[in-house]
Every structure is written in structure tokens, then in C-alpha cells.
Image: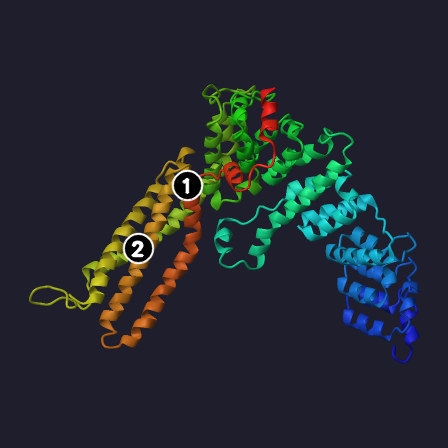
Amino acid sequence: MIKKDKHVITEPINSDGDTVLHIMVAIDINYFVNEMLSLIEDAKSLPEMKNKNGSTALHIAAMVGNTRAAKLLIKKNKDLLETQDLKLERPLHKAFENMHLSTVEYLLKAANDDRKTKKTSTPLDIRKGINLLVNAVSAKKYDLAKELIKNYPEFAATDDDVLMAIAKTFPSGLDYWETLIYPIAPIGNIEKKYKEPQEAEEVLKLVCNEINKKLEFPDAHSRYYTNPFLEAARQNAYQVVNEILKRSPKSIRYTDKSGYDIIQLSVIHLSEKIYELIYELGRARKFYKMVEDSSKNNMLHLVGRLAPWHKLKLRTGAALQLQRVLQWREKVKMMVSPAYHTKENIFNETPDLVFTNEHKNLMSEAETWMKTVAESCNITAALITTIVFAAAITVPGGNHQDNGFPMFAGQIPFMIFGVSVAISLFASSTALLMFQSILTGRFSEQDFLVSLPRRLIIGLCTLMISTTTMMVAFSATLLLVFCHGKRWLLAPTCALAFLPIASFITVQIPLMVDLFRSTYGQIEYIFEKYNLENGITFNLNDIRLFFSE
């Protein structure tokens, strides 16, 4: 029908004045959009094809986020980029309003290219632009954020919204496993997570640069930096703290509505990196030994508060989460004056009492988690002990009637069988004892610091050893009894024996690694690492000055 009468494309077909092209763009049928555009001989007519709101097909593409249709339309006629609707808004404005980041990114690039060609400018609403930049940062679309700041620097420096978004969503980077994998296979999501902190830091520096340009006098940073600085302390975003300190050393004195400064917030919110970054300043150690808030809470009262859930969930299971906060308390206790370890606040609460009350539910969950793991592993250990004990007294092939020696004595598979059974029996018995000790333990707070996790580590390790050696013993038995003279059975037997071993290790290794790192791994001293590898970028003398005043 369209081929017979091409004017159908330009005629409204509903009460809103939409053409076929408007509707096809809106419902994302882009192959049909492409066909219709090829039938339009006069591309200059596209900006005139408007509905009752004055919207062109490109306005519709921007509103629904149809980037593919936008590319087709702009390729046909670039004047669509500057065409305004009845509200005097261009397609780029519509994409801004509806927060379609991919479409905005494309339209912004196309508009900039067109602007350079025509030497014109495209003004944008400041508040909408700031909201878009905040959304780009929150969605980790750092390329779009950099493009927006480059073309519209006023978006970055109007208020603290953009810097606040960076502080809240600064990427954490690779975790332990991904750090090991990345040098070997830098693929997919791992590579993205590796690059995100670097890209975020670039955006951070651009925003701070624009803020500095806008300052009326050098010490007017507080309007822009106070809230983002304190939020970064809560979120453990040490890169943001470092960048702000470099530009405004006085920010070390910023406090929130409750009167808490950066060190106190880092203690409350379990922000180890911020703590190490600031506390390593020599005079800060002396300053915080006896510091108290308005309720006479010292640093140990603050560390006794329940940490935010998003910080706790970084550890596997409630037991390791509790262990983490216990380790954190021990770390903070080192910097508090001994006289304050038992000092009460205005509510007559000691630091230990605050910790116990705040972590009552987590303690209960940790005990349940530990018992559940121990019970399930205890059954497995008991079964393996029973099996290998029976195998030890019932050797394959039987014994000689005259002297009682095993029939297969002296053969290599039999030696493997004997050694494997012995190791499996000893290991499974050890595992059984460890899991029993967990189930009958007292589950006090301090037990979760080292004692209980250590027992679980020993139990899991010995259980893994017993499972592996049991399968080796079983494979050796098969070789002795059924594979005599049939060497071709050796490979499938070993392969099948390896299957349960690999399955067990795959399931248990992540938990075991988490247990080892949590129990025996030291807290990362980010400040020292940062100092040695990259150099501190803020002025230490400027920061120390404020502690000495």
C-alpha cells in the first residue's frame, strides 16, 4: 500500500497526529522504519512530519529509547537533531527527560558533531542535565559522564549532587578470586570491574576540577565537598576521600549532623580503607584515643554498633560476618586508651554491652550457620569413617589360608589401597572430632574470632583429604579385582574416581578460602599499600596541621 501511495507515510493515522513512521519508531519495528525511510525521496520533509505535540519521529525515538531508529533517522536527515516540538524541546532534551542513557550518549555525540559542523550550540536545562549526569554515574556509564562534563561543565559544578553520586556508587573493583583470575583471563565482567575504578576516578577528577574552577575564593570548598566527603567515608570510597583531601585539607574536620567526623564514621560503617588512610597520620592516633561524642560514646562504643548490611554481606555466612566485626573491634581497640575500654556512656552502657546488644541477632544467626555446616559435614565424616574402617579390616582379594597375608600383598595397587585407607581413616576421624567439638561448643563472642572458624577449617580440610583418599582406595581396589590384564580400564576408572573429588573440591574450596582469609589473613593496610605503590596525593603536613591545632 505504501509503495503504491508514498504519501501514506506522511499522513496522520490517529487522533494524536502520529504518522506510520511515528508509530513504527515507538513500537521498535526498526526494519519497517528503515524500509519507510528508503521510500521517502525528500529527506527534508522529515522535520515537518510532526504530531499534535510537535514531535518528530526522532523525538519519539528519544522518548522511548530507540537508539537504532534514531541512527536511521539522523542518517537520513541531521536537521532532525535541531527540530523543536511545541515545548521548544529538541530530541536530546526528550532523551534527557526519560533517562535513556544509551540514546542520550548517541544523540549527544551526533549533536556535538553537527554543532562542530554548523558552529552552533545546543543549550540544555541545567537541572535535567545534572539529573542525567547523576544517573550516568550511578549506572556506571562513565564514558557518557565524561562526555557530558566535557560538553556541559556546568552540570558538574552547580551543586554537590554529582560528587555525591560518585561517593555513593564508587566501584569496589575486583574481589579476591577475580584478582587471581584477571591476569590469566581478563574477559567479560572481570575486565569491566577492573577498569571501572579507573574510569570512575577520571570522572571524579573532572568533577573536582570543574568545582575548583567555579570557586569564588580558595577556601569555599565546603559547599561542594562536605556531604560527598562524609558519604565516601561511609561507603569506604577511599579514592574520593583522597581526592578531596588533596584539594581541601580542611575537609578532614567536616562532621555530619550527629557531629561525627571521618574517622568516627569509618569506625561505625566498617570502612577499613578510610580508617587506614586517615588513622596512619601520626597525630590522629593520639587525638582519637580518648575522643567521645555528645553521649559519651568513645570509639569502642561506636565500633559496637551493627555495621550496615551491605558491608557485612561481603563475607560468606553469618559466622564469618560476625568474625569480621569482631576483628574490626579488636583493630579499633588498639587505638583507644585502656581506661576507656570499660568506660560507660550516659546510658550506663559499656562498649562490650553495646556490642552484645547490637549483635544479638547476628550472634544467633552465626551459631545456627555454624551448627548447620558442622552437622551436614559431621554426617559425611561419620559415613567415610565407617566405610574406610570396614575396608581396612576386609582387604580386597582376601588372605592366604596358611599365613594370613593378603593375596595381593606386594602389588603396587594394593600398597596404594593400604596407604589411602589409612590416611582416609585418620583424616575422617579428625574431621568427625572437629565437627563434634563445634556442635558441643559454647559459642561465645570470642569463640567466633578464631576458635570456631579454626575448628571448621581443620574439619573441612581433613574431610576433603578423607574423601579424596577414599576414592583413591576404591579405585585401587577396582584395579586389583577387575582390571587385571586390562590396562585400558585404568583411564576410565581414574576419570570416574576424579569426578566426585572434583565436585567436592569445587563446592568446598570457596568456603575454605574465605575461612582461611577471614581467620588468618591480615586486614589490608590500604594506606601503606597506597603510599608505597602510588604515593599519597594529598599533603600530609596540611592534614597533620589540623590535628595539632
Camera-nearest residue between 381 and 263: 263
Tell me residue 129's x, y (percent).
79, 47
Secondary structure beneath label 1: helix
Tell me residue 137's x, y (percent).
69, 47
- Circle 1 packing at 10 Å, graded few (<14), some (14-19), many (20+), is many
Say above or below: 461 vs 80: above
**Disc 1 vs disc 2: which is toward the camera?**
1
The C terminus lies in quadrant = top right
Q: Amino acid at mark 1?
A: Thr
- Circle 2 packing at 10 Å, graded few (<14), some (14-19), many (20+), is many
Sequence-wise first label, 1 or 2: 2
Secondary structure beneath label 2: helix
Say above or below: 176 vs 277: below
Say above or below: 32 vs 362: below
Tell me residue 475's x, y (percent).
28, 66
In-image side of 136 versus 84 (left or right): left
* Residue at position x 61%, y 21% in the image: 294
Q: Point out the residue furthest to the bottom here.
A: 4
Q: How is the image coloured?
A: rainbow
Q: CA distance from mark 1 to mark 2?
A: 23 Å
* Residue at position x 81%, y 74% in the image: 35
The N terminus lies in quadrant = bottom right
Residue beneath label 2, please? Answer: 466
* Residue at position x 50%, y 25% in the image: 351
Labels 1 and 2 touching (C-beta < 8 A): no
Camera-nearest residue between 384 and 175: 175
Residue beneath label 1, please? Answer: 519
Q: Amino acid at mark 2?
A: Ser
Tell me residue 456's x, y (percent).
37, 45
